[in-house]
Image (spheres, rainbow, N blue to C red):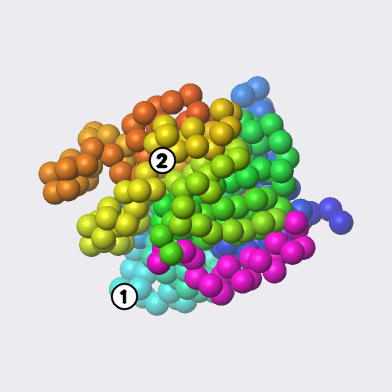
Amino acid sequence: MPVNLKGRNFLTLKDFTPEEIRYMLDLAHELKTKKRLGIFNRTMENKNIVLLFEKTSTRTRCAFEVAANDEGASVTFLSNSQMGKKESLEDTAKVLGRFYDGIEFRGFKQETVELLAKHAGVPVWNGLTDLYHPTQILADFMTIEEHVHKPLNKVKLVYVGDARNNMGNSLMIGSAKMGMTFVAIAPKNLWPDEKLVAEMNEVAKETGASISFSESIDAVEGADAIYTDVWVSMGEEDQFEERIKLLTPYRVTPEMMKKTGNPECIFLHCLPAFHDLETSVGREIYEKFGITEMEVSDEVFRSTASKVFDEAENRMHTIKAVMVATIGK
Ligand code: CP
Ligand code: NVA
């Protein structure tokens, strides 16, 4: 069956089959190659999209804007709308659906993006919620395909850190769908919701994926890619003290990379990352807790194993693929 994603929402990778995810990844690789060659098919000419942001962003916003521009669409960035304050989500979705061909939402609750999708009548794309970050996973898997020369179902992806945040959840879902070996290393109280794990274990039975959890960093052995994310996600800024205590043993260091036993192991991070003192938050943390780096050491971040800037670039190609697949002509 040929894949057809026209008119679909993109709220979580749970809603997509492995074939559909494969299709979006292939399209992203193709669009990246074409852009390098100066070929633009302009499949979104005369389309309009709106980007709704409740939380801050660099990559996601810019990826949507540049991708839309490459494909000929116009963009509205909206971070101060009436939504939820003077106008319900339902009414906002109905209004935006009359103006726009697609809606991106980044914010707190997954229910918000689901409600928008229910009432907008046009595709809604999840640009990150507390629960999921599905466009990020496409970029991560695309980067793995560029640097780990194995099919995804032969790849061992090890996620270290806060395994119950949007990245931990979404990497587990994506890995289950694509038949990968996924290991999350974290203190037990930061493991994902049991119901989601059970659901993904069911998916894994069909795809041949393996999902496991460990509190020990010894479980990095044999990793093709080590992935980490911030210890404190947007909206949880009161948690720094506790997370630093819990997660310091899980910082990605040169020793951890060595422990994989795989000299080819790559390092990934969705970014932004706390790896030095060049940010105001980083300096505040240093003044309070005396640490100069959090989830990843500056050495690993800047090493040749680190593919984080390819990964950041791939946000644009994969987000373009999602939009072209769902609303492109
Ligand atoms: N990785 C990511 O989503 O980055 P931004 O928060 O900058 O969009
Ligand atoms: N877990 C992070 C991801 C940022 C891209 C957050 O939600 O802040």
Between circles 2 and 1, the one closer to the viewer is: 2
Q: Which residue is mark 1?
A: 86
Element class at badge 1: loop
> Do we see residue 81 in this rendering?
yes
The residue indicated by pointer 2 is: 252
Mark 1 belongs to which amino acid?
A: Lys
> How many C-alpha atoms fall within 10 Å of the one at disc 2: few (<14), some, or many (≥20)?
many
What secondary structure characterizes most of the magenta part?
helix
Give the residue drawn at x 37%, y 44%. Answer: 251
Q: Quadrant of the N terminus?
A: bottom right
Q: In the rendering, at what x and y percent does residue 278 appear?
A: 24, 34
Q: Quadrant of residue 120?
A: bottom right
- Give the secondary structure at mark 2: loop
Residue 107 in the image, given as x and y percentages of width and height = 40, 62
Look at the image and tell me whether residue 75 can be seen.
no
Q: Residue at x 35, y 48 (%)?
A: 249
Horizontal relation, residue 153 to residue 94: left or right: right
State the extent of the magenta-drawn residues as a range: 189-208
Residue 118: quarter of image = bottom right
Residue kind at label 2, given as amino acid type: Val
Q: Residues within 10 Å of mark 1 (few under 14, many from 20)?
A: few
Task: Tell me what residue is drawn at x 84 percent, y 53 percent.
Answer: 2
Residue at the extreme left = 287
In the displayed structure, 87 sits above or below 303; it is below
* Residue in view at x 33 percent, y 68 percent: 82
